[in-house]
Each structure stands twice: as structure tokens, then as C-alpha cells.
Image: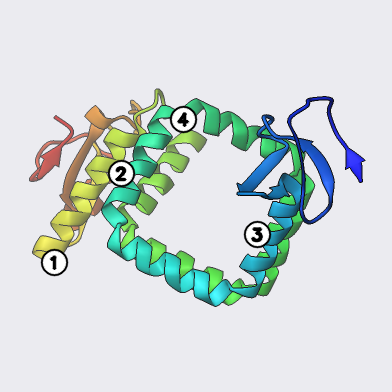
Amino acid sequence: MVQIGLSSDMKTCNICKVTLVVNENWNLSFQRKNYYICKECRKKYSKNYRDNNKNKLKEKYTIYYKENTDNILEYQKNYYEKNKELKKQYSIDYYKKYKNSIKNKNKTYREMNKERIIKQKNKWRLNNLCIKRSSNARYRAYKGKASIGNYKKEINNIYKKCRELEKMTNIKYHVDHIIPLNGKTVCGLHVPWNLQIIKAEDNLKKGNKITKNYNIVVTSE
């Protein structure tokens, strides 16, 4: 028998037979009447139970989630808001500690699921076409040194309005720069107040000119 600690209040784990200090919670995990299980033995028991009852637990959790979806999402949201910085720091520390392992795991997953990943990406592009367009425009502006400040959210909203308009009218629209990024005499910036939504055919006619002769559907104002 192995003894840990010097407290007079000692109990022995019924599995590994190690003597533990009862009032130290990190040492003692489970107790029922005169039956005690230490933390390590409890962990092994739980792991074995999960491994041997995967389908049963999966079904149980699925049912529970369906019945309590709103409460679970609300709890997760509140928890995240209260512990945002803590979770962020934990993620950073975890990545630093297991960087190589994470990279190898991701690489293996990509190699084994190439077709699935391609399908997921294509599906995402179709469902988020406005965000993809906004991202492409932001990249072009960055390469052309025409991007200032952090207006990602505002610009994404303009592209969302453009996409919604296309769905409602079944007409092609573009998000146009009022002052072109590559104008002949002056160059504009990729910022919300320099964007407008006009018909695609009008935008193609406009080109790099500065003009207000076209029917402006939506501006950032």
C-alpha cells in the first residue's frame, strides 16, 4: 500500500489501493459510503466507459442537444463572453505547445479528405458569395495600396445588400467604387463611403471613369 500525505483523515482507493488525503479534492475524485476511487482510477474508468459505449453516448447526447438546443447555445454564448480573453489565451498557449502535432494532424486530414474539402469550400462559396466577393475586393485593394482602416464589417454589409438585391430582382449588380481605385487622374480608396451598388452593365460601361450618370441603387450612406 502506498501512502500519500500526512493528514489523519486518510482513505484508500479501492482500485489501486493508494492511501489519499480525503479533504484534498485534487487527490480524491469519487466516494460512495465506504467505497473510494482516486482521480487517476476514475479517469481510466471514464475513458474505458466512453470507449465501450460510443454509440450509446452519441445517441444520448444527440437527443439531449435537440431537446435543449436553445439553452445550450445561450449558455455557450454567455460563457464565451465572460471568458473571451481566457479562451483566447488558452488557444494561443495550446497551439504553441502542440504546434507540430496540430500541423501534422491537419495535413493528414486534408490528404485523406481532399474531395470532401473541395465540396465544402464550393458549398460555402455558393452560400457566402457576397463575403467571397468582398474578400476578393479587399485583397485587390490591399495589393493596390488602396485600403485604409478596418471597415471589413461595413464593407461586407454593402456586398450582402448587393447579393440580396440580385436574389430579389434576378438582375446582376456590382459594388462599384465611386472614385475608381485605378483612375487616370485620381485614385480612390476601398472604404464604405466610396462604394455604391449599381447594375453590372452600368458598371462595365463606367469602367475607371468618375461619373454619376448611372442609377445608383445603394450607397454606404
How far apart marks 4 and 2 lie (CA) works out to 15 Å
For disc 2, the marked residue is 74
Mark toward the start of the polypeptide (3 vs 1): 3
What kind of residue is marked 1?
A: Asn
Residue 84 has which mark?
A: 4
Whether residue 182 is visible: no
Mark toward the start of the polypeptide (4 vs 1): 4
Residue 46 has which mark?
A: 3
Q: What residue sits 34% from the left and 29% below the top?
A: 151
Query: Callout 4: few (<14), some (14-19), or many (20+) C-alpha neighbours within 10 Å?
Result: few
Q: What residue sits 75% from the left and 44% below the top?
A: 98
Mark toward the start of the polypeptide (3 vs 4): 3
Q: Mark 3, mark 4: which one is toward the viewer? A: 3
What kind of residue is marked 4?
A: Lys
How far apart marks 1 and 2 lie (CA) works out to 37 Å
Residue 90 lies in what quarter of the image? Answer: top right
Mark toward the start of the polypeptide (1 vs 2): 2
Query: Where is residue 73 shown, x and y percent of the image?
Result: 33, 49
Q: Mark 3, mark 1: which one is toward the viewer? A: 3
